[in-house]
Image (spheres, helix red, strand yellow):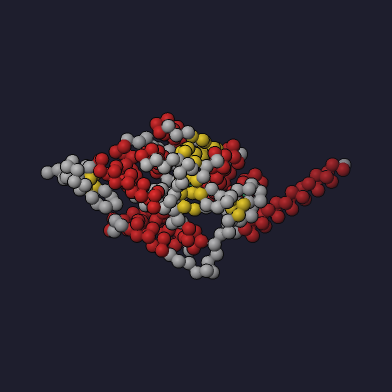
Amino acid sequence: MPVKCKADCGRNAVLKRPKTSDALCKDCFFAAFEAEVHYTIISNDLFKKGEKVAVAASGGKDSTVLAYILKLLNDRHDYGLDLVLLSIDEGITGYRDDSLETVKQNRDDYQIPLKILSYDELYGWTMDRIVEQIGRKNNCTFCGVFRRQALDRGAKLLQVDSIATGHNADDIAETVLMNILRGDTARLGRCTAIRTGSGEDTIARVKPLKYTYEKEIVMYAHYKKLVYFSTECVFAPNAYRGHARAFLKDLERVRPSVIMDIIHSGEQLKFKETVKKPERGTCGRCGFVSSQQPCKACILLEGLNRGLPKLGIGKKSKGDRMRAKQDQELALRERANLVKNDF
Ligand code: SF4
Ligand code: ZN
């Protein structure tokens, strides 16, 4: 016999909600899903009326659902937000070029303007060329650092008040675990924050899907028939996150609430005063937000342009030595050329 929807609507259930194990019909699942994201936005004061918000859009399931639901809730509850899609083109053939086509489809379907910024125009490098130079080992470090800054650059260009990202509950639980396993207390302290970086010269990042399970995002996109791109990056995987993800999935099988439990634990952590917190400032070279001088993006870029791609990987002292050695070699070569020219 068909199971009735738990919400007493009289319809038959078609799915079991991963978050609550409730059997629901499609419409009651949509209503519950949307009401929870709305509650997250309202109870955390994520936006103010009249704000301009950039949705970081990759074409993947999370950002597609985020763009769709922000548009829907903005209209339904009159948030008064001016939404815009912001995409970063890392220059990865066979991955980003295809996923950007999906974002363009989202732009047309949801009637939200789109701005695409590329690594090539911002840094003079594409990820394809970076990987050619550095190999497949630290590629995600370059990509992640450049993307973070590219979003800030895009946000400044578009004059938005905040950037909404599609991080979901699973991503955040994984990040908590990764920071514990790495002993990275500075990042552990801020990785559960739903809003980060709001200051005079920084653009706030907000995560409206912070409490939304990945499985439910996939279900929502599936039943709403949203168009999204699901192929993995050709330069993946990020091995360390992969371990945290596999571990979390194992735990989830025996304890379905583990994702929320880990986020809750992360939120409750208190740190000793002696734990170093990164001091946010602006990079003296590029003028974008940074907790070091110059910022990581500028050091990585300098390394690429000097032909020293490992310059920004590892300890600063090692980078300083590499830089000094290359400067010395260049000076010697120049002197040798001068001597030759004398003849
Ligand atoms: Fe960039 Fe790595 Fe993600 Fe690919 S997997 S998009 S290289 S961060
Ligand atoms: Zn910089």
Residue 3 x %, y %: 16, 45
**Residue at point 29% right, 46% down?**
32
Residue 171 x %, y %: 41, 51
Q: Nearer the viewer, residue 128 or 157?
A: 157
**Residue at point 26% right, 48% down?**
17
Displayed quadrant of residue 315: bottom right
In this rendering, the answer to whether 289 lies above or below 231 is: below
Q: Nearer the viewer, residue 197 or 277?
A: 197
In the rendered structure, the answer to whether residue 144 lies left or right of residue 16 reads right
- Number of numbered discs visible in the structure rendering: 0
Among all residues in the image, which is located at the extreme left?
A: 1
Q: Nearer the viewer, residue 104 or 74?
A: 74
Task: Answer yes or no: is residue 137 visible.
Answer: no
Residue 195 x %, y %: 47, 52
Residue 279 x %, y %: 58, 59
Task: Answer yes or no: is residue 265 visible.
Answer: yes
**Residue at point 76% right, 47% down?**
333
